[in-house]
Amino acid sequence: MIKHDNICQSSGVVMGGPWQIRHLKHKEYSPKQIADITYNALFEVEKQMSHFLESSYLMKLNRTSVGDWLNVPIQTIEVFAKAYEIYHQTNGALNIGLGKEINDWGFGSKKVETIDLNHSSQSENDTDIGFEIDVDAQKIRRTKDVHFNLSSIAKGYAVDYACKTLNDLGIDNFIVEAAGEVKCSGLKDNQKWQVGLELPIPNKFLVYDYIELDNDAIATSGSYRKYKDIDGKHFCHTFDAKTKLPIVPDQNNNLLAISVRDSSCMYADAMATALFVMGGVAGSNFADKHNIPALFLFKDEQGICEVRSRKWVELL
């Protein structure tokens, strides 16, 4: 735990990555109490939705027979409901039903010895997302034999959940980050919280610009943190929902990363993934059409260039 005058900072590891909170001192809660509240909220989501924990509700669902209902907590229902909504909004670009494929490539919980680079499972005409939820009864069931992976949406939800938990306790001035997704609340010494934008360079952490957040969130999807270089090709951990194969940036308009802003970190997290799957041209057009604040980073002859959606520019 670190203290800088009126600002306290705590950090740790959750959901397979680092988390941290920076906040103003609070009259009622100590920095340790605020850190514990934040971590416990983040870990609650991990316990429910992790694909690494066999005891999680996500993994229990993946083991149920197709058609059998499973009772789950309301938090899990909320994430599946939003995934369903964005799946249809993006014409399937966000697809949480690729857990088997993610595992087969070694991007999930399973270690693999060999990878079939040519295996492709086209699914352009498949409009079934693979699950059905009963919100009132808080239960869910698989409608086809797929495994779910929530890494494209659960981290954002975890940040939202932690922020809401803090707000409900009267803790208002802070910024929370978990596994790269960020959301802020209130102010930092009467100023907006600032977040650094990283250059999408593997194995390096270089900030090239800053933006101010105004009680909102930012999430990034890219090809530079989790990837596999095989036979001269750079395969990132994000999968094309149609081919069910990892995206190769060189074949995706040289798109390196996308950041999305929204009041909901869950939405920003999921939409950043969906836009990355669409690719630079289609993703940029979609963002402008749907008024989404999005920042696209491309590789070009000079290095890296930015393309900003109209809504992103409006918020600057």
Image: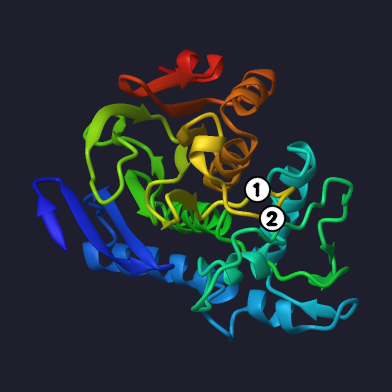
**Secondary structure under badge 2?**
loop
Question: What is the number of the mark on residue 244?
Answer: 2
Q: Quadrant of residue 230?
A: bottom left
Q: Which residue is mark 1?
A: 240
Give the class, few, some or many, for how many residues have Cα within 10 Å of label 1's Cα (few <14, many ≥20).
many
The reply, left or right, for residue 171 in relation to residue 284 is left
The reply to whether dot 1 and dot 2 touch (C-beta < 8 Å) is: yes
Q: Position of residue 285 (x, y in %)?
A: 65, 20
- For the point 54% across and 46% down, which residue is it? 269
Alpha carbon distance from label 1 to label 2? 5 Å
- In what quadrant of the picture does the N terminus appear? bottom left
Q: Is residue 190 visible?
A: no
| Camera-side residue of 185 and 300 | 300
The relative height of residue 219 versus residue 299 in the rendered view (above or below) is below
Q: Is residue 202 visible?
A: yes
The relative height of residue 65 versus residue 289 in the rendered view (above or below) is below
Give the class, few, some or many, for how many residues have Cα within 10 Å of label 2's Cα (few <14, many ≥20).
many
Q: Amino acid at mark 2?
A: Lys
Q: Position of residue 105 (x, y in %)?
A: 55, 66
**Secondary structure under badge 1?**
loop
